[in-house]
């Protein structure tokens, strides 16, 4: 009587489990790409004095979400609930056991997540359909009598940069949006490089393609005059160390 509706549906339709397993990476990707908008408003309420601290706060929140929710919760949620009583008594020992027993079973899920995330990010970055749509709308909406007016943003609508150069620019690369995804990829790499060595074969071309794509974008597309005030690098280094600790704890278990 108290069964979950989703479990009842899975029992009635056995193929539903396979469909959900295939859709899981795409659902996580959709959640991850709507999250920056929500956290942007949260950071705006914090009252930062400059954009460098604002972006650092947004980067920190996004990275924590990637590590805690995307990596941990999706991997050990069921096991964590089953072992909740013993976890209260021996938290460190039990948490290490949960990590060691649950994370290896999620290797395929995270491989699919990384594949979908890299493919989607590369497609959106290189084709830039959102910028193209905004630019097309901007050509017909807003002040456009002079080249300077046509190069200005209008209520969030940016002009087409390849039409209006050198009047307009896409701005600097949004490192505070890109780096959390890289931290997640490094976390998956550190954890599964030993537990599931095939992860190395998947992440190697992923990093290679991202390197080529963003090298091109930084040279030919984005404004190179970017200054975060040294706010992002210390946090990035700390999160990478946390990823290494997670990998070591998992392997020790």
Image: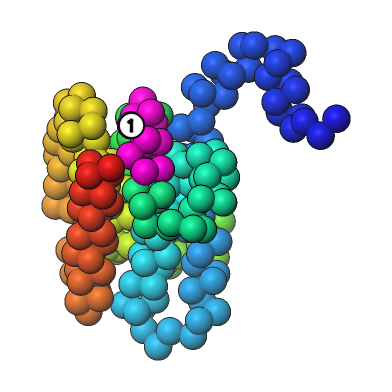
Residue placed at 51% from the left, 58% from the top?
A: 88
Residue 69 location, x and y as percent? Answer: 47, 50
What secondary structure prevails in the magenta region?
A: helix
- Packing grade of label 1 (10 A; few <14, some 14-19, many >=20) is some
Residue at x 54%, y 71% (from the top left corner): 42
What residue did someone put label 1 on? 104
Position of the C terminus by quadrant: top left
Count of numbered circles on the image: 1
| Quarter in which the N terminus is drawn | top right
Going by the picture, which residue comes out furthest to the right? 1
Q: Quadrant of residue 174?
A: bottom left
| Along the viewing direction, whichever of 15 and 35 lies nearer the viewer | 15
SS of the residue under disc 1: helix
Q: Which residues are magenta?
A: 97-108
Indicate whether 237 appears above or below 96: below
Q: Residue at x 22, y 79 (%)?
A: 229
Is 159 displayed left or right of 215 in the figure? right
Image position, residue 140 (x, y; %): 54, 51
Measuring from the top left, give residue 191's x and y in whole percent: 25, 41
Q: Is residue 128 visible?
A: no
- Residue 170 sits above or below residue 103 on the image: below
Query: Who's the residue at 57% across and 45% down the image?
Result: 81
């Amino acid at each position: 009587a108290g069964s979950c509706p989703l479990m009842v549906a899975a029992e009635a339709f056995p193929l539903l489990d396979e469909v959900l397993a295939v859709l899981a990476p795409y659902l996580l990707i959709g959640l991850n790409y709507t999250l920056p908008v929500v956290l942007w408003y949260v950071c705006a309420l914090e009252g930062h004095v400059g954009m460098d601290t604002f972006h650092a706060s947004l980067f920190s929140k996004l990275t924590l979400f990637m590590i805690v929710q995307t990596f941990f919760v999706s991997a050990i949620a069921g096991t964590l609930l089953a072992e909740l009583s013993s976890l209260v008594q021996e938290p460190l020992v039990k948490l290490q056991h949960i990590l060691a027993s649950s994370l290896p079973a999620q290797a395929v899920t995270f491989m699919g997540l990384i594949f979908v995330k890299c493919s989607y990010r590369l497609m959106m970055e290189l084709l830039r359909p959102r910028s193209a749509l905004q630019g097309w709308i901007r050509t017909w909406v807003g002040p456009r009598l002079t080249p300077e007016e046509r190069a200005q943003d209008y209520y969030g609508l940016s002009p087409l940069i390849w039409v209006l150069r050198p009047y307009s620019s896409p701005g600097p690369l949004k490192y505070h949006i890109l780096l959390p995804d890289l931290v997640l990829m490094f976390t998956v790499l550190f954890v599964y490089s030993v537990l599931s060595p095939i992860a190395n074969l998947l992440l190697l071309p992923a990093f290679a393609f991202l390197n080529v794509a963003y090298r091109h974008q930084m040279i030919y597309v984005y404004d190179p005059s970017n200054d975060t005030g040294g706010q992002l690098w210390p946090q990035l280094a700390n999160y990478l160390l946390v990823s290494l600790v997670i990998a070591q704890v998992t392997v020790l278990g």
